[in-house]
Amino acid sequence: MANLFPVSLILVKIQPQKHLIVYDIWEMRKVNLDMKPSNIFKKLSSLGAPNAVLVIVGLTLIALSAAWRFAVAPALKVVASDFDNFYSYDGKVSIFSANQVVSELPVIVEQRQYNRFELTTPEISTVEEHIRLLNGMSKSKIAERKNLFRVNRRTCELTQSRELELISSKKTYYIVFPFCTPKTSLYYDNGMSYLPAKARYTGKRKLKGMELWDYMIESTECYAIRKEHQDFVKQLLKLLPEGHPIKNAKLSWAEDKNQDENAFRILFGYKARILVEPSMGTIAGVQDVEETFFAIQACLKSTEYGVVPPAPLVKLNFSMRESSLKEALDLARDEREKMNLNFKYIPTGFLIIGIMALCTGIAIGVKEKSENERV
């Protein structure tokens, strides 16, 4: 009886003895093949198989599609090591005296983030950040600060020094949010204080055709400022008017062992709205930033009426410019497309071409076998 399927289906298994066992299912035959390529193709042809080369290529590409999707693509999904971003913000600085705003000044905030290649490894992406505060009218520099962030390239978490780990063991993020960003609260650390602020998920937001996660960041209390940013704070305090009690006062820092009872400690509070592209965790926008610097007497804990609240000194409010917001969105879109390329387009391309090659090989075999049967 003639086969219902006039084509041989070839299954190949590699044996430890360097032989191939080829199963010709429709013809119910099994043949041992020597591993030499010439013998393999000769035997495959003798089985009456469809175009052997196309079938093998097709099966190989189908297998490669699965290997790329589940092995190669996840290995390539890491935090970038080529950051070089420059963003500008517009805003104002408010000066306080006796808890009242006494003056305001328009400001420009410039932020640059770039990789320190000599400090970057396959596991850690090291990013340096420069922030400059400029007078909005004269463009003169008011203050500047620098931070060095070490980002785990697999988890996107900031890696902390041993000193900071003892203060807080929370997983924190700044340069990027985690891959497949969850719709839950996270911890955000911009490097100014010793403790991170909570980033609370508030919902989805669509901006220029992109769906983004919206996070509201807010310090729950005033935090001590890190030692490396003391100069930045002192530069800001020069904005205080003459006669302000803090302008020429002695300052105290968390690291000081002996606290002067007449010194003042400067504390920090932070708020911001962060827009995140969720698939790669790329920050696509920063808006409504509020950085507030407070003062409290270093040795004054409380009075008979309760805890003495810190008094605000300087408050910075700024949001990303439209041009910088567009650049951040473009970066987020590019990172998302890189992920789609590795997880969707490349494996799908291999799969489609493999299926086409396999079907073509089978079709050629069907045609040849039908012609032979007629003869």
Image (tube, rainbow, N blue to C red):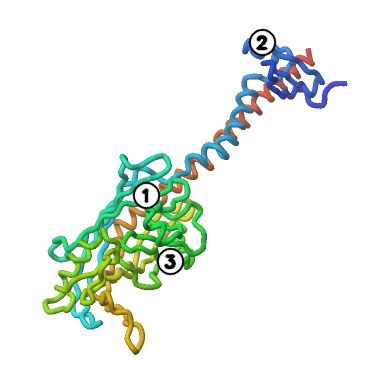
Horizontal arrangement in the rendering, residue 104 relative to residue 324 (left or right): left
Q: Quadrant of residue 273?
A: bottom left
Q: In which quarter of the image is the N terminus?
A: top right
Check if mark 2's residue and mark 1's residue have beta carbons within 8 Å.
no
Is residue 70 left or right of 128 when viewed as pictured?
right
Few, some or many residues within 10 Å of mark 1 (<14, 14–19, 20+): many
Q: What element carries label 2?
A: helix
Q: Where does label 3 land, which residue? A: 198
Q: Which mark is residue 150?
A: 1
Q: Report the front residue among 332 and 122.
A: 122
**Which residue lies under the disc numbered 2?**
39
Calculate the distance from the C-alpha at mark 2 to the C-alpha at mark 3.
Answer: 67 Å
- Any part of residue 316 in sight: yes
Residue nearest the viewer, comparing 128 with 41: 128
The amino acid beneath tag 2 is Asn
Up-down relation of residue 157 to residue 295 (above or below): above
Separation (CA) of disc 2 from disc 1: 56 Å
Q: Which amino acid does label 3 sit on?
A: Lys
Q: What residue type is labelled 1?
A: Arg
Q: Say if residue 329 shows up in the picture.
A: no
- Does residue 80 lie above or below 109 as drawn? above
